[in-house]
Amino acid sequence: MLKSIIVNKKVLVFGAALAFILILVKIFEYFFFHYKFSLETYLGIIAVIFLILGIYFGSKLGRKNIVANIEPQNSASINNNTETDLSGRELEVLLNIANGLTNQEIADKLFVSLNTIKTHTTNIYSKLGVKNRTQAVSKAKALNLLN
């Protein structure tokens, strides 16, 4: 709820800033460009101004909020000394599962889609011969994949 309020506030500030800039451009047009430039030149100048502003505000508003990843105190870690047929990415997903993250949280953390995480999870289950997350973590600890 708070995040949507902050985003709505940013959008309103952005809209107000663009409206103010448009008013300034219209005043500037009235006093300076009315008789000196053709319509195409005037429109080109306005387009460049709004392009620059759009890129600037888009980079500010569109930037993802990266949340610091706080690991729980009893977090698991990967044992690199154990041979396994799990890929490196599957081991990474398994570690995050062991740390109690949801599929969406894992996807956000690893910068991949939710479907990719679901595919990795399915592959982990089949390679370990288990049916759910709890069994996967237990089996991984039994096979000494996780510390």
Image: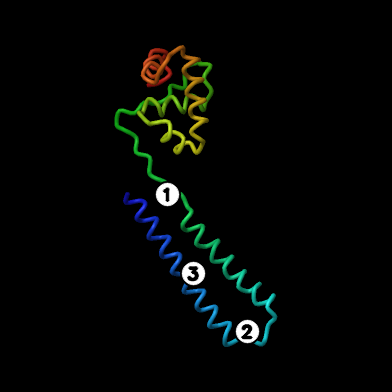
Horizontal and vertical percent for residue 134?
36, 19
Q: Secondary structure at mark 3?
A: helix
Q: Residue at x 35, y 28 (%)?
A: 100
* Callout 2 crowding tier (Cα within 10 Å): few <14, some 14–19, many ≥20: some
Q: Secondary structure at mark 1?
A: loop
Horizontal and vertical percent for residue 122?
49, 21
* Callout 1 crowding tier (Cα within 10 Å): few <14, some 14–19, many ≥20: few
Horizontal and vertical percent for residue 56?
52, 62
Residue type at mark 2 is Phe
- Between marks 2 and 1 in the image, the one whose residue lies nearer the viewer: 2
Q: Residue at x 40, y 18 (%)?
A: 132
Mark 1 → mark 3, Cα distance in angstroms: 24 Å
Spot the residue most to the left.
Answer: 73
- Between disc 1 and disc 3, whose residue precedes? 3
Residue type at mark 1 is Asn
Of the numbered discs in the image, which one, if any, rests on residue 65? 1
Q: Which residue is mark 3?
A: 18
Q: Is residue 24 above or below residue 62?
A: below
Q: Is residue 120 above or below residue 112?
A: above
- Between disc 2 and disc 1, whose residue precedes? 2
Quadrant in the picture for residue 17: bottom left
